[in-house]
Image (cartoon, rainbow, N blue to C red):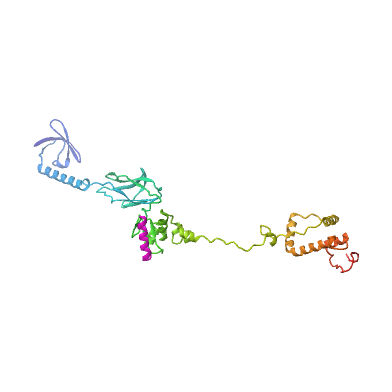
């Protein structure tokens, strides 16, 4: 098909061509013959290239098929969530590897009772949720978000165990004697627990008698309780799960909750002495254990009147409570001497015990004691004694 066009304007890159019906066509200048200017008439032959068109269409179809087979034929799959183990306060969940196909990973989240409990790494296949309530029902769901869309797992309902349900116990044995290991295995089977050869995420207790080894180090790293075999015996005796604090390797055996150990840990009762102990009065002590002076012998009415008359003649100033407390100590030490002096005073002042009455001055001298540096002769009278 031959078309005649008039050149209207020629620019550096584009030329404006005019048709016979006065239509404008922009045409590349590089395709026009040289020395073309405004007003020139050019003939352009136009034809359809079917071979090239078919080839281009085939290439485009192949590209579409490649894109579909690479990105559209497979899609991510929904996670399959299940419960691996449950105890009184924890749940271990696991799922199959996440299939992303050709999509990109965005996030993997765990929901508990409809609320987000936390994010999970892409390549993880299990997780442990702790701090749950005893004998309580929970609902868990795993949600996967990708560039191809969001995919959710089926909801899994799990109920934590009662304190008397020991089926959730999973024990990994450590360094144990052969006989003790067999006994431990039999005890675990009786209570309905499980044995694991290696330390896993669902391991609830690590039982050993020695704190060493690679398994022990891994249990410590994963914060798994490391207890002695007596813990399993305590659970079997009580018919319920017991605390692990008394069964740690460095725990005091006397504090264990096993009935036999508790009975042996009690101190023996104190035996009461069959020998009669002296009373407080005989020991010269009061109820608090401090020493007190013995009660002096009672005086008759005449002696009391004479003592009161002698004290009235020569009154001493009353002592303060502090001075009285200071005077108690020497009185405690001189208890025997004071008692002896009081007995002599009683014999001397009592008229019934001596034939001749003694003057009041003599009684005063006997009460006060001899003056410093003076001695009373044996047969001298009161007047002969130097004062």
Q: Position of residue 257 (x, y in %)?
A: 46, 57
* Left or right position of 242 against 76: right
The residue most toward the top is 21
* Left or right position of 335 against 246: right
Q: Nearer the viewer, residue 178 or 78?
A: 178
**Quarter of the image where one finds residue 355:** bottom right
Q: Position of residue 97 (x, y in %)?
A: 28, 51
Find the magenta span and give its range. Answer: 175-192
Task: State the residue at coordinates (30%, 48%).
Answer: 81
Image quarter (top left, top right, bottom left or bottom right) of the C terminus: bottom right
Q: Nearer the viewer, residue 224 or 365?
A: 365
Most frequent secondary structure within the magenta stretch: helix
Q: Position of residue 99 (x, y in %)?
A: 26, 49
63 drawn magenta: no
* Left or right position of 242 against 3: right
Image quarter (top left, top right, bottom left or bottom right) of the N terminus: top left
Q: Nearer the viewer, residue 203 or 267?
A: 267
The residue most toward the left is 1
């Amino acid at each position: 098909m031959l078309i005649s066009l008039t050149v209207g304007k020629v620019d550096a890159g584009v030329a404006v061509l005019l048709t016979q019906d006065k239509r404008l066509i922009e045409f590349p200048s590089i395709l026009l013959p040289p020395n073309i200017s405004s007003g020139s008439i050019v003939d352009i032959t136009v034809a359809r290239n079917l071979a090239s068109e078919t080839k281009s269409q085939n290439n485009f179809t192949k590209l579409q098929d490649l894109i579909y087979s690479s990105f559209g034929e497979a899609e991510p799959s929904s996670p399959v969530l299940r419960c691996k183990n449950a105890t009184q306060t924890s749940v271990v969940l696991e799922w199959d590897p996440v299939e992303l196909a050709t999509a990109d990973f965005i996030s993997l989240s765990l929901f508990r009772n409809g609320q987000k409990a936390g994010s999970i790494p892409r390549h993880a296949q299990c997780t442990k949720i702790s701090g749950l309530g005893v004998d309580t029902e929970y609902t868990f769901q795993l949600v996967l978000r990708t560039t191809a869309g969001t995919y959710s797992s089926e909801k899994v309902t799990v109920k934590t165990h009662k304190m008397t349900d020991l089926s959730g116990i999973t024990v990994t044995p450590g360094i144990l004697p052969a006989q003790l290991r067999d006994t431990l295995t039999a005890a675990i089977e009786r209570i309905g627990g499980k044995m694991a050869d290696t330390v896993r995420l669902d391991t609830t207790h690590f039982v050993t008698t020695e704190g060493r080894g690679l398994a022990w180090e891994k249990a410590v790293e994963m914060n798994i309780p490391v207890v002695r075999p007596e813990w399993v015996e305590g659970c079997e005796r009580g018919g319920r799960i017991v605390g692990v604090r008394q069964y740690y390797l460095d725990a005091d055996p006397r504090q264990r909750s096993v009935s036999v150990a508790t009975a042996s840990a009690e101190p023996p009762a104190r035996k009461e002495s069959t020998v009669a102990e002296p009373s407080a009065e005989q020991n010269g002590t009061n109820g608090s254990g401090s020493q007190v002076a013995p009660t002096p012998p009672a005086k008759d009415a005449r002696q009391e009147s004479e003592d009161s008359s002698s004290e009235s003649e020569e009154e001493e100033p009353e002592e303060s409570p502090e001075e009285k407390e200071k005077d108690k100590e020497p009185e405690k030490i001189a208890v025997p001497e004071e008692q002896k002096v009081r007995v002599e005073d009683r014999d001397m002042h009592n008229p019934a015990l001596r034939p001749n009455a003694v003057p009041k001055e003599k009684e005063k001298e006997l009460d006060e004691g001899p003056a410093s540096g003076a001695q009373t002769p044996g047969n001298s009278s009161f007047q002969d004694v130097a004062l």
